[in-house]
Image (cartoon, rainbow, N blue to C red):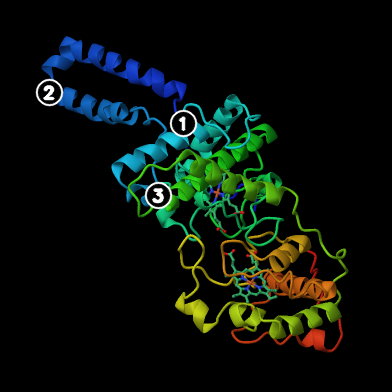
Amino acid sequence: MTGRFDFVVSYESPTPLIERRGVFLLPCVAAQVFRCPVIRRNAILRGVLLTLIGPLLVGCERPGPIEFVSSEKVLALSPALQAQIRQILDKECGTPAQPRLLGDGSVATDHLLEGQNVYMQRCAQCHGMTGDGNGEAAKWLYPRPRDYRAGKFKFTSTPFDYRPLSSDLVRTVRSGIPGTSMPAFNLLPAREIGAVVDYILALTRRGELELQLASEAEGTDEALPEETIADLKGVVLERWNEARSSAVNLLSSEPVFTAEKVAAGKQAFLTRGCSKCHGEDGRGQTVDNLRGDLKDAWGHVTRAADLTSGLLHGGHRADDIYRRIFNGTTGTPMPSFQSALAGEPETIWNLVGYVLYVANRRRAGEMPAAGMLSLPEVSTGAKTAGLDVNEE
Ligand code: HEC
Ligand code: HEC
């Protein structure tokens, strides 16, 4: 899945040199050309030239400045409160020209500006300048690009509803999210990935503080007092501190996925609640799923994954799938089975084995039939039909 979506990643940087020069050069050249007597006398020639140069002039317009837009929640408040919240955010989280990472003064402005440069070139068209998931391309995409402002991330190594680790975000940016429009940026230098991830963190914490402030200000017309602002800042930062020490370790190490384990995994899949959402065959063909009843934390319709699609969004490695089952997927209806399966490390691995098995069937040339997978080769205790269930 590497680099497959690179074609969508072309984007203008905020102030590319060629555009800066173009803005001044092209009108000068055009003025000189139109001074030529031959051209001045010949209307047809003038028309042709204008048609050629016109689009160039328009195309060389410099992109507008970077601006953070206020959330709908803030825009619903009184003008005075809106102004106060914008002022607090500028002070705590910086401005586009001088971004800051809330709660971490050790992150240099230059580093964040480097991240901003990468972000504006490669991410903003989907994730939006403010990180609100409303980039120009967003309305065409399913799933929608992440709106960072809620502070919620799906593919983390931390427990359900916890903030992610920076290393989780680095991994996602590097590998992309298979089966979605989120590209893999595996060719970006590590330094740029580090910078863009810190810039995302700055946008995320800014969005979280904005949400806290707007919720607090709802239904009043009075300015927010200083101590309330400090408390809300604490609420935002506490969640990130809490996540730092809470990465979930695997309960036991990865086994060899024998046919017996896959069969036991299928049994657990049918009896532990998985099939209620994912369907008995893992294709997600349940009534609720097809009706689009499930919603995610961002208010979008979501569906229990089709585990047979061969494109697991959270990654294809056994430990990726383990984390999806054990930690759940924050922001989505995919629950954590941490407490339900805490005493059964083997069952978790069996489920992983079964998910790997169904996820690889199409790759092995088998089209799962509608309805329940029969798994005949498993019930006889034979090998899983030559499938390499550890295949990447
Ligand atoms: C073509 C659109 C597109 C571009 C360009 C893009 N993304 Fe994404 N991104 C997405 C989509 C769609 C998702 C959500 C996928 C999902 O919910 O499963 C996403 C999700 C994410 C997530 C959230 C992962 C999680 O665990 O929830 C991060 C972080 C992210 N993108 C970072 C970036 C960065 C950094 C860049 C630029 C270097 C970038 N994206 C460029 C579409 C894009
Ligand atoms: C309440 C409904 C629900 C239940 C119960 C449920 N899931 Fe899910 N599951 C989801 C949804 C929704 C998603 C998609 C999350 C997203 O948007 O990425 C998902 C995603 C997953 C994924 C990640 C797929 C990917 O693309 O990476 C795996 C693996 C998974 N589920 C396995 C299981 C297993 C195993 C069980 C039972 C132990 C289970 N699920 C129970 C709703 C459910």
Q: Nearer the viewer, mark 2 or mark 1?
A: 1
Using the rendered image of the protein, determine whether residue 384 is visible from the camera's viewpoint: no
Q: Which mark, by number, is residue 217?
A: 3
Specify few, some or many for label 1: CA neighbours under 10 Å numbering under 14, 14-19, or 20 or more: some
Question: In which quadrant of the rendered view does residue 12 lie?
Answer: top left
Question: In which quadrant of the rendered view does residue 320 lie?
Answer: bottom right
Q: Quadrant of the C terminus?
A: bottom right
| Amino acid, disc 2 | Ala
| Alpha-carbon span between mark 2 and mark 1 | 47 Å
| Amino acid, disc 3 | Ala
Circle 1 — which element? loop
| Alpha-carbon span between mark 3 and mark 1 | 24 Å
Find disc 1 in the rendering and name its residue.
96
Specify few, some or many for label 2: CA neighbours under 10 Å numbering under 14, 14-19, or 20 or more: few
| Amino acid, disc 1 | Pro
Q: Position of residue 26 (x, y in %)?
A: 32, 19
Circle 3 — which element? helix
Find disc 2 in the rendering and name its residue.
43
Q: In the depicted view, which residue is nearer to us: 329 or 94?
A: 94
Residue located at (64% from left, 52% from top): 163
Lower position in the chain sequence, tag 3 or tag 2: 2
| Alpha-carbon span between mark 3 and mark 2 | 63 Å
Q: Nearer the viewer, mark 3 or mark 2?
A: 3
Residue located at (12% from left, 23% from top): 43
